[in-house]
Amino acid sequence: MQNTSSPTPFSQTFFHGTKADLHLGDLIETGLNSNYGQQNKAKYIYLTATLDAAIWGAELALGDGRERIYLVEPTGPIEDDPNLTDKKFPGNPTMSYRSKHPFRVVGELAIWQGHAPEQVKAMKEGLARLREQGIEAIED
């Protein structure tokens, strides 16, 4: 999905899962340390149009902060997230995207249900196994 026009209110809801404490109007930008993998400077930032993918983002983010789901709007073009699209989930059913342009925080989801603890544990163990094999979850 290539978003080439300016975002318009309510044209599409996008979510960003994280442990960062953000506020309305804040911008999520590239160049900060990633919440995942080696915590390298992020070349891209990620968003999704599905709540489930955003929940995974919040649950898998590094750090000790509270898991949060923000409603965000892109300020520029977005593209399919190649870390998921066609590598793991052909056709992008997770509706996951990335951008080099900031996302503006327009709200926070106050109530949401996380995955079962055993699911989160299994996912984290799977990511740890990949990391041991030298495979990063996010490839820029």
Image: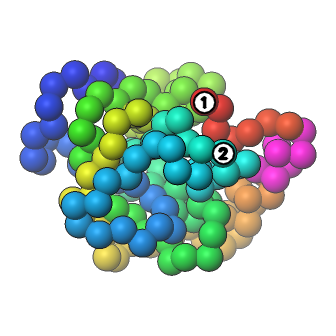
Q: Can residue 72 be seen in the rendering of this structure?
A: no
As displayed, is residue 90 above or below residue 62? above
Hey, which residue is sitting farthest front in the picture?
31
Gap in Å between the C-alphas at discs 2 and 1? 10 Å
The tag earlier along the polypeptide, 2 or 1, is: 2
Residue that mark 1 sits on:
140
Residue at x-position 63% and y-position 69% = 63
Tell me whether the residue at label 2 lies in contact with that at label 1, contact meaning CB atoms closer than 8 angstroms: yes
Residue 133, percent across and down?
89, 39
Residue at x-position 46% and y-position 43% = 30
Count all numbered tags in the image, as a single digit. 2
Residue 70, percent across and down?
34, 62
Name the foreground residue: 28 vs 2.
28
Residue at x-position 33% and y-position 24% = 1
Within 10 Å of disc 2 (Cα), the crowding (few <14, some 14-19, many 20+) is few
Which region shows up in magenta? 127-133
Residue at x-position 43% and y-position 27% = 80
Name the foreground residue: 61 vs 42.
42
Residue that mark 2 sits on:
40
Q: Main secondary structure of the magenta part?
A: helix
Three-letter amino acid code at the position of disc 2: Asn
Q: Can residue 57 be seen in the rendering of this structure?
A: yes
As displayed, is residue 107 above or below residue 9? below
Q: Is residue 73 magenta?
A: no
Residue 49, percent across and down?
34, 45
Hey, which residue is sitting farthest left in the picture?
9
